[in-house]
Amino acid sequence: AAVQIGLVAMLRAMEIKPDGIIGHSVGELGCAYADGCLTAEQTIYAALVRGKASKEVELIPGMMAAIGLGSSQVTPFLPPDIEIACNNSSTSCTLSGPSESVHTFVNVLTRKCVFAKAVNVNNIAYHSRYIKPAAPLLLKYLQGAITEPKPRSPKWISTSVQEKDWNSDLAQYASPAYFTNNLLSRVYFEEGARHIPKNAIVIEIAPHALLAPIVKKSLDMETVHIALTNRSKSVNNIECLLEGIGNLYLNGCEPNVNAIYPDIEYPIPCDVPSISYFLTWDFSVKSDNGLERGCAKCWYKTFDLGICSKQKYQHLLDYKIGGKLLIPPAAYINFVLNFFMKMRPTTKSVAIENFRTYDCDMSVFQKGNSEISMNISRVGGKFAITSEGRVGTWSKNCETEQLLASGEIKAVDKMSVNIPEWKTEIGTLEFEAYLKNLKYSVHENQCLSHLTKYLEGYTGEILSKGRTFDLIDNCLKVVVIDRSDYKRPEVPYFVQNIVFNMDSVKEYNQGKSVQVFYDPETNEIISSAVTMKKIKTKEFLLDNP
């Protein structure tokens, strides 16, 4: 609650005003403060007595669990002593019940390759019938502090009262009864999130961006999620906060950043350094965009993909989802990386930015005589991969060609990476079993071993088969495992930033395995050979789901 108060106060100071407010579970206390219904003192007190009341009454040993299925999917086989505590999204819910029963059910789901993870809630089964003994005491505490409840504004979307009851007396006011009901009732976040409009900017106000995966799966693809905090020890939270403010600006908001700077006191001391260099263009400083200049404006290459005839592309025939051939994004990344390295063989680190693939019919590549072309601008590093051997047209609506992939590529300074040290292991995942459930064809190119789920993310070992393609593809497969709904596969289509350490890539191709980490919260792949940031995926539509 204290962190939420601070973040709301900061956003107010920067004149960022919400069009809507929604909270998850106890997060509705933060909504009340942001809506002006509670003071900072009342918000802190309400959070305190919520925990105090839960501790001062006798409750059964309880447990909660996050499940990778929607409430409607899990209800038919839910044990009678376990309740659905939170409707998070159509593919995620939280269960609540006696510790032993929840633990047993989690194991059952895990054996069926359904994501299930116990949640540390201090042995209290919140949002279920098992927390009811704490309600009278909590109500008494709150009535002593919230003596004149204020009406909730239309901006505040309730997630503790069902929409059909939003006009009831209980839902109208931020009252002691409302917050007591919040403790007892199911969290209807999935239903509330439907009121968030498309193209919205969703700012998560919490000590840790726990709702990021839920928000990204339940909202429109164009919705922007911005986190202001990160509990990872390896992350500087001041930098995370400032990055979030920067993302607000990049997405169309106009934060008044002067509010977070100290007031200027005059006169200014004479030893304050001049910043004029940063305000003018210094033409004496030369910059290298990583591409050689020459008489030609572009490097380009046209070649026969020849999937069915050339041995070097045979492995792409194995890449199918639901029996449908798909040229994997990793293949395009590998094509442009290899082409760039032929032009710049001494480059030590290569960055690919704003990489994107486009929807197109892949059946043409099964004929064995299809050509694709690749061109890279020498000036800016922009590249395009197109079908039908045409070069120079970038529109995917062109009648003579199809745009398959695009982005920018350049040489960069030596890649630096901080390998995380995760300690809270949750369990080992059956990688091939997950892929089979998602209708991915399982073949020898799946060289990811020992995929393990940690509280912070996933880690696994990518074994070498002598191809850079396998390294890239298996990194992206870890993201697919995290993003895909049960039996509904996702495919990557956009990566904001990819950086290769070419020395490490060479070692991988010579037989050295690579340890890879994926942090779902920061949306980042980390390894000694390649890093990827801001990966976007979309559902792959199966012909016969």
Image: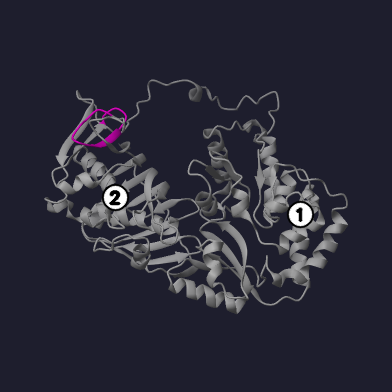
Image coordinates of residue 169 in percent, x first then y, are 81, 52
- What amino acid type is highlighted by mark number 2? Pro
Q: Is residue 141 something that shows in the picture?
A: yes
* Colour pattern: one colour
Please state, as top left, top right, bottom left or bottom right, where the C terminus lies in the image: bottom left
Residue on which disc 2 sits: 328
Placement of 420 over or under 335, stated as above or below:
below
Q: Residue at x 69, y 77 (%)?
A: 60
For the record, the magenta segment spans 377-393
- What amino acid type is highlighted by mark number 1? Ile
Marks 1/2: CA–CA distance: 50 Å
Q: Do the residues under discs 1 and 2 have CB atoms within 8 angstroms?
A: no
Q: Residues within 10 Å of mark 2 (few under 14, many from 20)?
A: some
Judge left or right: residue 208 versus residue 437: right
**Residue 298 is one of the magenta-drawn residues:** no
Residue 286 location, quadrant: top left
Image coordinates of residue 157 in percent, x first then y, are 68, 47
Q: Residue at x 44, y 21 (%)?
A: 281
Residue on which disc 1 sits: 44
Task: Identify the element where label 1 is drawn.
Answer: helix
**Between discs 1 and 2, the one toward the N terminus:** 1
Residue situated in front as seen by the camera: 463 or 325: 325
**Residue 381 is one of the magenta-drawn residues:** yes
Foreground mark, 1 or 2, reads 2
